[in-house]
Image (cartoon, helix red, strand yellow):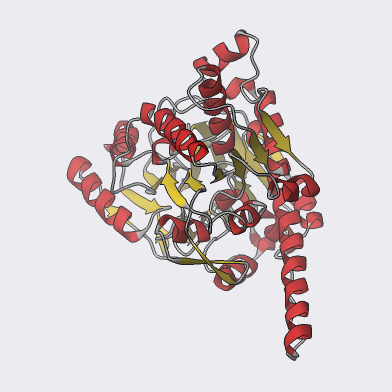
């Protein structure tokens, strides 16, 4: 078995790992790389493997940094299947169509601005921006998806089997094992996907992998410990009360899958408990609207607390002061409203979608708050906001960051250092090597050292394109 790392190698985005086994080539994830726009576009467009040479894709979960470049694979001629959990199949149906739509719309928007600048400034040039992929490409790959129940094993290529366990990161997320015969023995490769945390809202807790020989392990928060989960609700309530008192609005960039639904459930509870003022709350994302319907469908993924919510006859994702916004005209109208409000909008790293427009209309007013609810990769707009740059670029124009910035790290869907080390403990003694991915170098260095000290297992943080022989 051979293993090559093409994405999420010493960075957090663009998860993609190539496995060669028994003469067949598989991809573990095929995510969008996010960062500096030109670099990201080129890396996502120029696939590191020939799509026609790939026999199967094994997808850990639906987040765009894990699934979002699958339409590019189809665009380049991929004809194999995408194996993943049933909930992920449905989530990707909404997410990849939305991603393709945004690719097309953003290209149109940039080209329109470029033509306007040429007309006003008399600039020459015919350069235009093309979308990374189209809705046609998204439909082509969605037709290749096949649902595999968690815990079920299937043969994905001759002599190559795939099975999964619950990862506890988001609805439908999985960790996986790839098994293949090599030299008369079976090699078992584990891939954590993104490891979640115990007691996250809505979803079940992460399960442990069965014994494996090698482990690809995420390391997003490998150098730190999270604050206790129960602080998130209090911090959210304080932020809403404080911003509303000064007449401001809260703009919360939130991943449309998982984080938005968790925040909606928490806000619902806070409203019922009368812990926040009775302000309007908007979920402004057609994707989040569609994804919420998928959440309602897949109750088999719920934890006991959310099932109890349903048993009491309540809708976890709907209440009187909350409104889901689907149409673009309604989204634009939000910027004309006055008075306190909360807007949840995608994307979570502020790299695309409607949230950029809301930030453009909010960040220069000190009454407002930007509520950061998830990890922000290097060079993204979200990271610049978290780092409190005096100016941040929005649609290519510098804007003053005067709004308050609040980070809700307590709600992170990623395991922290202690949780990662504990999650791998049951399989640690049988490991020959751990490969750290989905983390920045500092996080990987600290986590790798701790794993080696705790379990005596060699740890490698591979570079992009680095290849290993597993035996």
Q: Is residue 168 above or below residue 102?
A: above
Above or below 136: residue 48: below
Residue at left offset 79%, top offset 84%:
119
Query: Relative to the observer, which residue lies in front, 29 or 168?
Result: 168
Q: Is residue 123 visible?
A: yes
The residue positioned farthest toward the left in the image shown: 453
Which of 206/387 is in front?
387
Name the residue at 68% across, 42% down: 284
Front in this rendered view, residue 79 or 248 = 248
x and y percentages locating residue 214 in the rendered image:
37, 46
Q: Residue at x 61, y 21 (%)?
A: 316
Give x and y (percent) for residue 49: 60, 65
Please identify the residue farthest to the top as the structure is shown: 312
In the rendered structure, the answer to whether residue 31 lies left or right of residue 377 reads: right
Q: Is residue 123 above or below residue 459?
A: below
x, y percent for residue 468:
40, 60
Kindly indicate the quadrant of the structure image that contains residue 160: top right
Indicate the position of residue 441 as horizontal and vertical percent values. Answer: 33, 60
Question: Would residue 143 be visible to someone looking at this image?
Answer: no
User: On the picture, is 93 further left or further right than 29?
Assistant: right
* Residue in the image at 25% along x and 52% along y: 446
Q: Is residue 128 above or below residue 225?
A: below
């Amino acid at each position: 078995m051979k293993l090559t790392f093409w994405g999420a190698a010493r960075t957090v985005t663009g998860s993609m790992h190539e496995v060669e086994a028994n003469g067949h080539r598989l991809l573990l994830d095929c995510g969008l790389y996010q960062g500096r726009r030109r670099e990201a576009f080129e890396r996502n467009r120029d696939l590191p493997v020939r799509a026609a040479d790939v026999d199967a894709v094994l997808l850990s979960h639906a987040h765009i940094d894990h699934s979002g470049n699958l339409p590019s694979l189809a665009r380049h001629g991929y004809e194999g299947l995408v194996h993943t959990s049933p909930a992920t199949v449905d989530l990707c149906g909404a997410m990849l169509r939305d991603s393709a739509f945004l690719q097309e719309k953003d290209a149109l928007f940039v080209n329109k601005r470029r033509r306007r600048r040429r007309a006003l400034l008399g600039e020459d040039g015919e350069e235009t921006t093309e979308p990374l992929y189209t809705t046609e490409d998204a439909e082509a790959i969605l037709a290749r998806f096949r649902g595999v129940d968690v815990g079920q094993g299937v043969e994905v290529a001759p002599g190559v089997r795939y099975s999964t366990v619950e990862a506890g990161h988001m609805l439908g997320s999985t960790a996986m094992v790839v098994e293949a015969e090599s030299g008369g023995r079976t090699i078992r490769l584990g891939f954590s996907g993104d490891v979640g945390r115990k007691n996250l809202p809505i979803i079940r807790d992460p399960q442990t992998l069965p014994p494996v020989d090698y482990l690809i392990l995420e390391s997003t928060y490998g150098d730190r410990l999270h604050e206790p989960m129960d602080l998130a609700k209090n911090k959210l309530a304080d932020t809403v009360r404080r911003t509303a008192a000064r007449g401001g609005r809260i703009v919360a960039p939130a991943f449309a899958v998982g984080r938005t639904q968790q925040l909606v459930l928490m806000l619902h509870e806070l409203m019922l408990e009368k812990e926040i003022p009775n302000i309007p709350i908007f979920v402004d994302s057609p994707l989040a609207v569609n994804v919420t319907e998928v959440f309602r469908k897949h109750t088999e993924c719920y934890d006991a607390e959310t099932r109890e919510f349903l048993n009491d006859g309540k809708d976890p994702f709907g209440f009187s002061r909350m409104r889901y916004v689907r149409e673009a005209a309604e989204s634009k109208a939000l910027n004309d409203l006055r008075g306190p409000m909360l807007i949840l909008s995608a994307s979570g790293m502020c790299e695309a979608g409607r949230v950029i427009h809301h930030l453009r209309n909010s960040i220069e007013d000190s009454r407002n708050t930007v509520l950061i609810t998830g990890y922000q990769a290097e060079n993204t707009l979200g990271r610049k906001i978290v780092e409190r740059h005096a100016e941040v670029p929005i649609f290519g124009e510098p804007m003053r960051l005067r709004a308050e910035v609040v980070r809700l790290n307590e709600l992170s869907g990623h395991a922290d250092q202690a949780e990662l080390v504990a999650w791998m403990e049951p399989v640690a003694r049988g490991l020959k090597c751990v490969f750290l991915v989905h983390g920045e170098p500092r996080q990987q260095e600290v986590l790798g050292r701790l794993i080696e000290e705790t379990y005596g297992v060699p740890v490698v943080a591979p570079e992009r394109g680095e290849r290993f022989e597993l035996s």
